Image: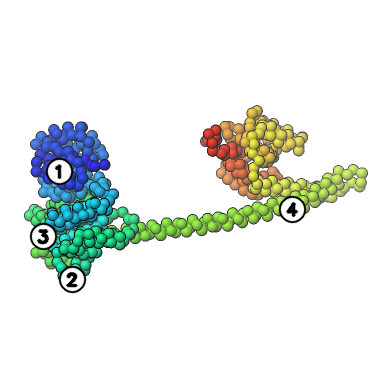
Amino acid sequence: MTPTVLIVDDSLTVRMDLHEAFSDDGFTTVLCASGTEARAAFVAAVFDAAVLDVILPDADGLELLAELRGLRPDVVIMLLSSEQEVADRLAGLRTGADEYIGKPYDAGYVVARTRQLLGEAPQGADRTSVLVIDDSMTFREQLRDLLEPEGYAVLTAASGEEGLRMAADRRPHAVIVDGVMPGIDGATVIRRIRLDPALRDTPCILMTAADDYATEMQMLEAGADGFVRKQQDLAVVLAKLAAVLRQSAEQLPIEGFGNLYGPGKVLIISTNDDDRQVWADALRPEGYDTVLSANIGEALELLAEQPADCIVVGFDDDLDRARNACRSIRDVPQIGELPLIVTGDEHAMLDCLSAGADDYVRRVDIPEGLLVHVRAQIRRKQSHDESRRIREELMRRELDAAEERSARQLAETRAALVEELEWRNRELEAFSGSVSHDLRGPLQVISSFAEHVLDEEDGEPLGEQTRHRITRIHAAALRMADLVESLLILARASRGELRRERFDMTATARQVISDVAARDPKRIVEYAVPEGMTADGDEGLVRVILENLINNAVKFTRKVEHPVVEVGHEGDRFYVRDNGAGFPAEQAGQLFRPFARLHDARDFPGTGIGLTTVHRAVERHGGEIWAESAEGRGATFWFTLPPAAEPPGPERRANPRRSG
């Protein structure tokens, strides 16, 4: 989609200059000469960006900015003004401008900065782009006619300086440059491209009318990837271009770096008005936007609102002020890494460099030297950023590889543990069978013989000590039998598939209560079970859950005068509640560990496996179990039995989930 820019300026020259620059770059423009026309366009026109003049015959640019920001909060807004004071720039940025550009401006910078703020890809970005730099319009058009039918997007520039700025803005896939041009020649263009971190890998072909071999060697030494004589058939250009594009190195997928010749901003700080203007005049022809400030305080305030690419500081012969300015800039974390250049007499160089300056330009070397030093410092900063980002990218890749190795090792370890667990389960199953046959039989014999001896009335009466000993043998055999039975149930809960079905939970709970009550008929316990409870699960394992929970409830109410055990449900949660001994609430997490006990075994005997068995059985159903209690106030054990997952289909019903 073609972006649209609104241009508001009372100068016809400025409007047409910006219109031409934006149109050449693929923008659609809406032009307004006054505040009245601008306000009408705010409501009626559709645009993505706006360039507003600060001073209009019938309106204040800052007021227009505030109105536009209120109506179109997402539009990119740039202020264009002849007002160079930092206070005016700060006022514009704080009112809502995304950029503030001083006049005289560079149209290429305005367009490039607008596209940068919009995040727009240049026109033709979906095709391989080739930048042609030649001072001959005829030859530029010949190359366009040659390349466009082959599917290339062709960009053109009439000079080396313009070509470098366009390369920075558009980042072409390849550059074709004439060897001899006014201003900087083709070899210099290629050398500067090789110095730019963002452009250094761009393939470059140099064309020349020279016919000697020495010139070709000189151009290749300058950094050209290919060399074509203008006397040759232009088809050679296509072949060389295809070759250099094919051989271009694949780059790491790291976010783009800033360009050395792209839209750059230089902050100039000096107490001398003439110096500030001379330095700005030296930098503007190279496409830099210059910001002029008279003191370090307002400069730091501006940098907090608007970043810069380089800072130039000059304070005549006031060495202390220059040193303090360097230290003040370096002390601010957000801007402390910006390139900092100081200008002055040579005797102050060492002091300024030790105070934090990156470079020093002698007064006698300005203006030519200032431009070279600014470009060099920005290049150094970009190279540093490039190296840092590459290191970060490589580190990220190494971390990703390490995570992948760790995940693989974890998967292998988990697989080994699963295999060992399966083997242990098979071993447990075999052991369970052995226990069933080899232990239950002898225990039954011991228990029965002890009962027979204790109940025998015809023989010689047992002495008190003998009866006590046989009673202990009988109790130990019963406890051992309970322990074996608990282990068998625990093994069953830990293996095999569930035999799930919908069953009557109320009926199952009443059967369990009947069995528990029959074991001690003299004990009076009040039981409560509601009608209509149903569950989806393995009824056999659910019976084990209820047996253990109800047995525990009965056991821990032995010291209560009127024991009550309640089985019920709330929504999809089931519970078993008693009014017995309870336990400290903070110890609830220990209940489900094997052989864990919270009470003295002499008061409440047991194996310590029952609740572990319950926990395994509930987990096997995909449910949860937890307990609530307070010491001396009974306990409530909650558990869930989620329905089995249904296969996908049009009649699939939603499964209820536990709430709360």
Instruction: Name the residue at 17% across, 47% down.
Output: 24
Tag nearer the camera, 2 or 4:
2
> Does residue 431 sit above or below 345 in this rendering?
above
User: Which quadrant of the figure has residue 571?
Assistant: top right
Is mark 2 in CB contact (under 8 Å) with mark 3?
no
Tag nearer the camera, 2 or 3:
2
Q: How far apart are marks 3 and 1 (CA)?
A: 27 Å
User: Which quadrant of the figure has residue 309?
Assistant: bottom left
Question: Residue 25's spot in the image, x, y percent?
Answer: 19, 47
In this figure, which residue is indicated by the disc labeled 4?
434
Task: Name the quarter where the N terminus is drawn.
Answer: top left
Secondary structure found at label 4: helix
589 sits to left or right of 79: right
Q: Residue 213 carries which label?
A: 2
Which amino acid lies under the numbered mark 2 shown in the image of this protein? Answer: Tyr
In this figure, which residue is indicated by the disc labeled 1?
19
10 Å crowding of disc 2: few (<14), some (14-19), many (20+): few
10 Å crowding of disc 4: few (<14), some (14-19), many (20+): few
Mark sitting earlier along the chain (2/3): 3
